[in-house]
Amino acid sequence: MTPTPGTDPRPLTGEPLALDLLNTRWLGGDGPHDLLDSLTGLAVWLESPPVREHLGPGPTPTADRATLDRLLLARTALGALAAAAARPGRAAPGDADRLNEVLSHGRIRRTLGPEGVPVSAVEVDDPSWAPAWHAAENWLRLVADRPDRIHPCANDACVLHFYDVSKNGTRRWCSMAGCGNRAKAQRHYARRSGA
């Protein structure tokens, strides 16, 4: 699937940046999809609201091979960490190392601005590291704040992740309109058929 520039085809958007990066892979009725399988898909992702919000004002990072390779490195690291978070005690020794590799290419520089107000600025080794670094840094914020709110969809056939912001923390589905409704329909069918 080649996305149309400016049109995000993913079924779940608007999650925190780290999870939004994970959700660039999904399963559709016609099989698996990967938004980051092309530079066109990368351009779509770079223009998406979670990315623009985290990168702040200024030009959009270049949708080039270096940026894509670095994002794929970050996505692989985040995927392993998300899988380990879903199964506590199952983290592989290298899971954190891969994310730390991405994080090693950037830093937050804090200064005191001219009006006495603290200023934070992200500095990266190369602009192509910026999206990957921001996604990795966002993961750190999520696990520092509420790691118990990072979830995979409860649908075994779904590969999407979400950050549960519900009041009681009991959200189970990536979306009620998609996986949630399918689960309700399957339960209803099972009750009606006596299975």
Image (tube, rainbow, N blue to C red):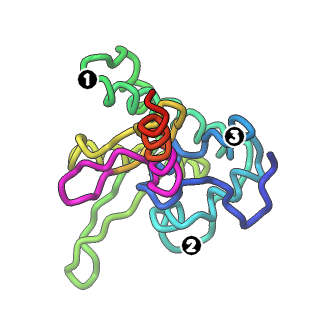
Q: Which residue is mark 2?
A: 58
Q: Which residue is mark 1?
A: 88
Q: Count all numbered tags in the image, as a single digit.
A: 3
Residue 139: x %, y % from top left: 36, 44
Q: Quadrant of the N terminus?
A: top right
**Front one among 184 and 159:** 184
Please name whichever residue, 63 or 142, is drawn nearer the observer in this view of the structure: 142
Q: Tell me where residue 132 appears, x and y as whole percent.
A: 52, 45
Residue 104 appearing in the image: no
Q: Is residue 64 left or right of residue 86?
A: right
**Label located before the other in sequence (3 or 2):** 3
Mark 1 vs 2: CB contact within 8 A: no
Eyeballing the image, is 62 above or below 137?
A: below
Amino acid type at mark 3: His
Tell whether 168 sits left or right of 13.
left
Q: Which mark is nearer the camera, 1 or 2?
A: 1
Write the start and end of the magenta stretch as one range.
164-182
Which element carries disc 2, helix, strand or loop? Answer: loop
Q: Is residue 165 magenta?
A: yes
Q: Residues within 10 Å of mark 3 (few under 14, many from 20)?
A: some
- Label 1 Cα crowd, 10 Å radius (few <14 / some 14-19 / many 20+): few
Classify mark 2: residues with Cα within 10 Å, few (<14), some (14-19) or many (20+): few
Q: CA distance from mark 1 to mark 2?
A: 39 Å
Contact check, label 3 and label 2, Cβ < 8 Å: no
As helix, strand or loop, the secondary structure at mark 3 comes to strand
